[in-house]
Image (cartoon, grey):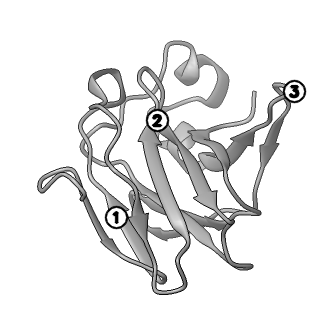
Amino acid sequence: ALPKDSAKAALPTDSVLKTVAPKNAPATPGPAKDSAGTRVTLKPRPGVFGLDIDAVPGLLAGAALSFSYAVQFAAPAGARDRYGSDLAFERELMIARIGTDSIVTFFLTKRIGSDFITAVIPGPGRYVVAAPR
């Protein structure tokens, strides 16, 4: 079962994980299953704005990941120097996957709200919200 206040699942179409600021990420919520039997586990990543997704046997093609970050948003040190302002940095945010080889792959990310981004993802993995350097 999923913790009452930290996650809510309505698989296979949506799974919502609500958490606090990245540095205060809670313990891993329990897995959820969709009607086809896919077991999905979402694990927040302490210290970064991201999460690990595990899905057995895997995610369906076209699965999307979305982040809403308004409450926790704070541009990191150096972002103003690099991008000119916090807003300019925020406009560059994208969803990226960190591979087991530490290669970062950025995905075509759509901004569907002022603090809400989404991207189609290829499958389970470690995902973060980041801006290219």
Q: Is residue 48 above or below residue 129?
A: above
Q: Residue furthest front?
A: 37
Q: Amino acid at mark 3?
A: Asp
14 vs 41, nearest the viewer: 41
Q: As drawn, is 91 to the left or to the right of 29? A: right
Mark before the other along the chain sequence, 1 or 2:
1
Mark 2 or mark 3, which is nearer the start of the sequence?
Answer: 2
Front-most of 53 and 22? 53
The amino acid type found where label 1 is placed reads Val
- Amino acid residing under circle 2: Phe
Which numbered dot is residue 101? 3
Is there CB contact under 8 Å for labels 3 and 1? no
Residue 24: give its label.
Answer: none
Expressed as whole percent of the image width and height from the top left, the position of residue 50 reads 50, 39
Badge 1 element:
strand
Crowd around label 2: few <14 · some 14–19 · many ≥20 (10 Å): many
How crowded is the residue under tag 3: few (<14 C-alpha within 10 Å), some, or many (20+)? few
Q: Which residue is mark 2?
A: 49
The picture places residue 8, in percent across and down from the top left corner, at 25, 65
Q: Is residue 86 above or below residue 120?
A: above
Q: Residue 47 at x, y = what percent?
A: 43, 20
Q: Is residue 47 left or right of residue 25?
A: right
Q: Nearer the viewer, residue 32 or 69?
A: 32
Q: Which residue is mark 1?
A: 16
